[in-house]
Amino acid sequence: MTPAEIERFAELNESLSQDIQVELIESDHEKSPVIKQFCDELAQRVPKIRIKKEAGDPDEAPSIRIHDGLRYQAIPEGTEIGPFIEAIQLKDTGAARLEASTAARLAKIDLPTHLTIYVSPRCTFCPGVVRQLLPLLTLNTNIRLTVVDTMHFPEFAEKDNIQSVPTLILEGQFRWTGTIQINEIIEMMVNRDPGVLGPSSLEMMLKEGNAGRLAEMMLNKMEIFPAFYELLLHAKWPVRLGAMVAMEEIIAKNPDLAVQTIKPLWQKFDEVDNRVKGDLVYILGQMAPLETIPLLEIVLKGEYAAEVKEAAREALEDPS
């Protein structure tokens, strides 16, 4: 930290009315030790901040989680320091304010919403955009924001084709570069078609125990959301389990809608690992026998792992 940054963090400590817990999510990423070093120094410079260290998934990026709605995949420095400090102060006071009309529109966002903003420690416009977004997270817990530093995580910027900062992305589809109109962002979040929800938002629903709600959303629209397939094929068992629970409800309430998933899932069958294959066989076994028995027989007779074949055998012996 520079002397100026050290002074700002000392002022932050004086401004806090209570101890604040901030979570460090570690991983095997090369930047994880650097983020840990920042958090260790942050705790030293701001004694009222308590760092809780958690082991994240080895293959994911490390992050600093200020609260459920705000995660930094960044090492806050340069122009990023100001909004980072203000986010911690907002967690302390909860005193976010918006115009009454804006707050009323914000309250209508009832779907999980994931925003990603790409920033740089040398960008003079980035802090203003982040500051506009911070109150939204406090006033509506359906909204989640990830702040990504393009300097420390260039691979994510490349993946999302980031050409300049700040760039704000909603659900991986809608994007704004440069200055933003916050009412425009809110309006887009309010009027979204649930079918365009991204994998991260659907995953958030599952992690919060809302598999049933996700199933009802798809049943009401008579549509399997495109991002839902990613959850059924997810490498992580808890995510996949939540998606399977939602899928079972769809199978029970609208078998014809469930059948629409057979072809897309079968097309990915040989690309996933054996654990995922076994779960897909289970799901196929719950659906219309005329549609799935030929596929299960292919698995049983094919060159697949013993546990995958056993799952197919059980599904064929006891079709639902």
Image (cartoon, rainbow, N blue to C red):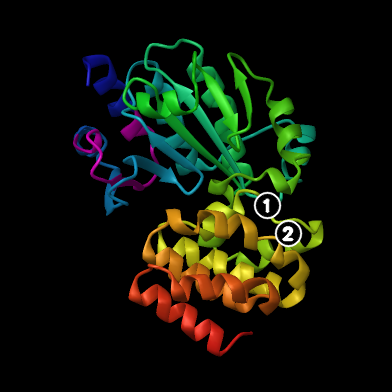
Query: Which element carries disc 1, helix, strand or loop?
Result: loop
Tell how many labels.
Answer: 2
- Region in magenta: 12-33
Residue 263 appears at what percent x and percent y? 63, 58
Quickly name the residue at label 2: 218
Residue 132 appears at what percent x and percent y? 59, 26
For the point 61% across and 37% down, the residue is 136
For the point 51% across and 54% down, the residue is 268
Quickly name the residue at label 1: 225
User: In the rendered view, would you say 180 is above or below 32?
Assistant: above
For the point 43% across and 40% down, the residue is 71
* Amino acid identity at mark 1: Phe
Classify 10 Å Cα crowding around label 1: few (below 14), some (14-19), many (20 and above): many
Q: CA gap, disc 1 to disc 2?
A: 7 Å
Q: Look at the image and say whether residue 25 sits in the magenta stretch.
A: yes
Q: Is residue 218 visible?
A: yes
In this rendering, would 95 be left or right of 303? right
Q: Is residue 204 visible?
A: no
Classify 10 Å Cα crowding around label 2: few (below 14), some (14-19), many (20 and above): some
Given the current orientation, which residue lies at the most extreme bottom position?
317
Q: Toward the viewer: 262 or 294?
A: 294
Q: Look at the image and say whether residue 130 sits in the magenta stretch.
A: no
Q: Toward the viewer: 213 or 6?
A: 213
Placement of the N terminus among the 4 image quadrants: top left
Q: Which mark is residue 94?
A: none
Query: Which element carries disc 2, helix, strand or loop?
Result: helix
The reply to whether dot 1 and dot 2 touch (C-beta < 8 Å) is yes
